[in-house]
Image: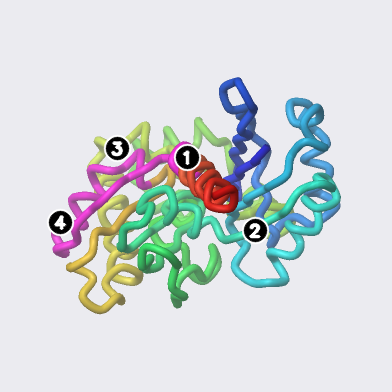
Amino acid sequence: MILVADSGSSSSEWMLNVPDSKPLRFRTKGLNPFFVNEKEIERVMKDVPEIIPYIDEIREVYFFGAGCVTPDRREIVSNALTTFFPNAFIAVESDLVGCAYAACGQKKGLVATLGTGSDISYYDGRELKPSHQGLGYVLGDEGSGSWFGKLLLSRYLYGEMPPDLAKKFGEKYRVNKDIVIKNVYQKDRPNAYLAAFAMFMEENRQHPYIDKVLTDGFDEFVRTNIMTYPNYWEHECNFVGSIAFHFDLHLAKVCALHGIKVGKILKSPMEDLFAFIIEREMKQIDVGVG
């Protein structure tokens, strides 16, 4: 049995191929190794009753996660999953690799994530190439949920948001300076906390102010990330993530202004990623048998 996971900083999606049945699907909170340790990952998995009956039968686990960008961070996740799935081969890669498999398959192209965080890289049809992007919510994450959330919060607290929007924002979230500082600087998962405010834009996307915020944010992402690639206009750019999906019209409009060809825009890579992994592994089994 093969288990596949796509993990962001806010939540994780899992799919398990169950013989003679439809795949088992479940969710957990995000398992970004920059914010959780091995013990916490183990605790999260133990709280998933759906997976317990299959623990000893699972032979392969493919985990694609935010924050899994260096060997030491991947090791945190790998060690925790090895403890939980003692009979399984464990493979841990970055979430961007999973997005490349889901959006491109074996085609070349740029792959960008726009969810809680943001990142981009070039995929040559087989491997994801190293990039200078993906600096996280403090230094980067342009156009992401945490980036937009941080912008909305700061403008609200500074009194720079239009009065009608500020009233809606205040009534919806009931935040003040002390609450925000405590959640951002003293509690776990500050990037996920910030990203939660980005959905305010979905409810108010028709407001001219929000329209400009979205346009400016995606323009920042395009200029800082996509346009740094040589001949970027020659490649399709595929997007994965809730921000890209919910605000696809704004994103496509900004891309068009810069001559960027938009490929797939997926809310989640899970369906396509799971299909890619299962097909790949089944082919390898067939080759081995042959």
Tell me, yes or no, whether the highlighted magenta stretch contains residue 53: no
Lower sequence index among marks 2 and 1? 2
Q: Residues within 10 Å of mark 1 (few under 14, many from 20)?
A: some
Locate residue 267, reporting x and y percent. Answer: 41, 40
Residue marked by disc 2: 92
Whichever of callouts 1 and 4 sits on the residue coming sooner in the sequence is 4
Mark sitting on residue 275? 1
The image shows residue 120 at horizontal and vertical percentages of 40, 64
Residue 90 image-quadrant placement: bottom right
Residue of label 3: 205
Q: Could you say where residue 53 lies in the image, as x and y percent from the top left? A: 80, 27
Q: What's the distance in space between the residues labelled 4 and 2, CA to CA?
A: 35 Å
Marks 3 and 2: which is nearer the front? 2
Q: Residue at x 61, y 44 (%)?
A: 5
From the image, tell me which residue sits under label 4.
256
- Cα–Cα gap, marks 3 and 4: 20 Å
**Percent coordinates x, y for residue 231 in the rendering:** 21, 75
Region of the chain picked out in magenta, as a range: 244-273
Quadrant in the picture for residue 265: top left
Question: Which numbered disc, 1 or 3, marks the residue that appears first in the sequence?
Answer: 3
Marks 3 and 2, Cα distance to the nearest angstrom?
Answer: 37 Å
Which of the labelled discs sits on residue 24, or is there none?
none
